[in-house]
């Protein structure tokens, strides 16, 4: 997981929001494209790991794949609901909320 997570965070930290320049948006999209394959493979290899579904959902959201993003983010929440794990479960709910924000929903 650490290896695929670095793909999204490599390079200099940059704040990116919908109102920033196209260069920042292009950088974010290119990092999401680079992370797509590794995260899809990770989900195939470990389908019960909510962290991979959560991150894949974010990647899909940044690529504009709305239905895929919502499916993966929801799958992460379903795999580790707050009712089962009150410590880590809320993180997946927050991840799903971030996906909704990226998609503008």
Image (tube, rainbow, N blue to C red):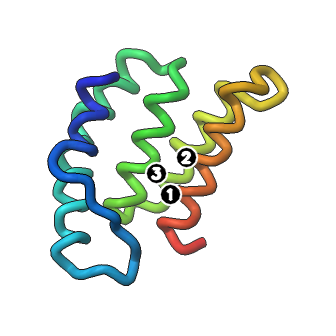
Task: Determine the image quadrant of residue 48.
Answer: top right
Q: Which mark is residue 81?
A: none
Task: Name the element at disc 2.
Answer: helix
x then y, percent, for residue 81: 74, 30
x then y, percent, for residue 67: 50, 57
In percent of the image, x 54 and y 27: which residue is there?
Answer: 50
Which residue does the numbered mark 3 point to in the structure image? Answer: 68
Outermost residue, right direction?
83
Contact flag, marks 1 and 3 (Cβ < 8 Å): yes
Which residue does the numbered mark 1 point to in the structure image? Answer: 67
In percent of the image, x 22 and y 70: which residue is there?
Answer: 24
Contact flag, marks 1 and 2 (Cβ < 8 Å): yes
The C terminus sits in image quarter: bottom right
Task: Name the element at disc 3.
Answer: helix
x then y, percent, for residue 55: 43, 39
x then y, percent, for residue 51: 49, 29
Contact flag, marks 3 and 2 (Cβ < 8 Å): yes
Q: In this view, does 3 lie to the left or right of 69?
A: left
Question: Marks 1 and 3, how far apart in space?
Answer: 4 Å
> Number of callouts in the render?
3
Q: In this view, does 70 lie to the left or right of 32?
A: right
Q: In this view, does 79 lie above or below 100?
A: above
Q: Is residue 81 left or right of residue 48?
A: right
In percent of the image, x 60 and y 50: which residue is there?
Answer: 96
Q: In this view, does 62 lie to the left or right of 7?
A: right
Question: Marks 1 and 2, how far apart in space?
Answer: 6 Å
In percent of the image, x 54 and y 74: which residue is there?
Answer: 104
Q: Which mark is residue 71?
A: 2
Number of residues whose C-alpha sits closer than 10 Å to that of mark 3, classed few (under 14), some (14–19) or many (20 or more)? some
Q: In this view, does 71 lie above or below 88?
A: below
Q: In this view, does 19 lie above or below 4?
A: below
Number of residues whose C-alpha sits closer than 10 Å to that of mark 2, classed few (under 14), some (14–19) or many (20 or more)? some
């Amino acid at each position: 997981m650490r290896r695929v997570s670095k793909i999204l965070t490599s390079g200099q930290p940059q704040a990116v929001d919908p109102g920033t320049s196209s260069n920042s948006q292009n950088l974010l999209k290119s990092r999401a494209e680079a992370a797509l394959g590794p995260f899809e493979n990770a989900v195939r290899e470990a389908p019960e790991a909510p962290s991979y579904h959560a991150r894949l959902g974010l990647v899909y959201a940044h690529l504009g794949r709305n239905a895929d993003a919502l499916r993966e983010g929801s799958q992460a929440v379903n795999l580790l609901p707050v009712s089962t794990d009150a410590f880590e479960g809320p993180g997946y709910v927050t991840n799903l909320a971030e996906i909704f924000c990226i998609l503008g929903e």
